Each structure stands twice: as structure tokens, then as C-alpha cells.
Image (cartoon, rainbow, N blue to C red):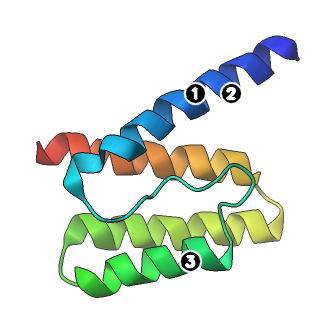
Amino acid sequence: MVSKCIFTTLLLFATTGFAAIGDGDKFDFMPIPGEFCNSLSDQKQRDLFKQYPKDEGIINLYAQYLGLCQLVHDGSITEQTASVLCTEQRNSLIKNRK
């Protein structure tokens, strides 16, 4: 259990670093731990989608975000799992665009 907590903490710090350098974008995709699917996070995702409505990468991120939040609300996955999956997708998009 302790090793899982340490791993999760290290993963969070690593992904937070990626979110902070986010290739100059104006949006912070990495939510505060425990607050992945909340109104502030929802608004950030909607704003990004509205700003780039024809960008396939952003459309995919937004769709994934909506789907993951639905799974969280249904109790199918944890908020932490959803946050990690969304962050991995975002980091992949950034890496592919560099």
C-alpha cells in the first residue's frame, strides 16, 4: 500500500511538471488531485474546445474528458484513474505536436 501511495505521488509530480511546461498553451489541464470532474475543470475543457473547435486533437481530448467524467460519476473508475488517463492523452498530444 505504501509503495502504491509513493508511486502515485511520484506520478502526480511528474505529470504536474509536464502540465506546467505544456508547450506554451494557456490552459492548465492537470487538475488538483481529487478535483478532476468539477465545475472549474469542466469550464476549462469547454473553453479550450470553444477556442479550437476544429482541432482534432482538442476534440479528442474533450471527448475523452467527457467520457472519463461520466465513468467517474457512474462509479466505474476512480477520479484518480480518470485524471491519469486524461493527462497521458494530453501529454501524448503535446509530444506529437513538437
Circle 2 residue? 8
Q: Secondary structure at mark 3?
A: helix
Cα–Cα span, label 3 and label 1: 23 Å
Q: In the rendered view, would you say 39 is above or below 74? A: below
Q: Spatial distance from mark 2 to mark 1, Cα to Cα?
A: 5 Å
Q: Residue at x 55, y 30 (%)?
A: 13
Quarter of the view holding residue 96: top left
The Cα–Cα distance between marks 2 and 3, rounded to whole angstroms, is 23 Å
x 70%, y 46%: residue: 80
> How many neighbours does mark 1 have within 10 angstroms: few (below 14), some (14-19), or many (20 or more)?
few
Query: In front: 1, or 19?
Result: 19
In the displayed structure, does residue 72 sit left or right of residue 97? right
- Residue 45 position, x and y percent, is 45, 74
For marks 2 and 3 on the same chain, the one whose residue lies earlier in the sequence: 2
Under mark 2, the amino acid is Thr
Identify the element where label 2 is drawn.
helix
Q: Nearer the viewer, residue 81 or 24?
A: 24
Q: Amino acid at mark 1?
A: Leu
Under mark 3, the amino acid is Asp
- In this view, 38 is above or below 77: below
Image location of residue 22, percent across then percent down: 30, 48
How far from the left and from the top, in percent, is residue 38? 68, 73
Residue furthest to the left: 98
Q: Which mark is residue 11?
A: 1
Q: Which residue is mark 3?
A: 42
Q: Is residue 49 left or right of residue 88?
A: left
Residue 92, placed above or below residue 28: above
Q: Callout 2: few (<14), some (14-19), or many (20+) C-alpha neighbours within 10 Å?
A: some
Q: Residue at x 57, y 71 (%)?
A: 41
C-beta proximity under 8 Å, tags 2 and 3 = no
Relative placement, left or right, of 67 versus 62 is right
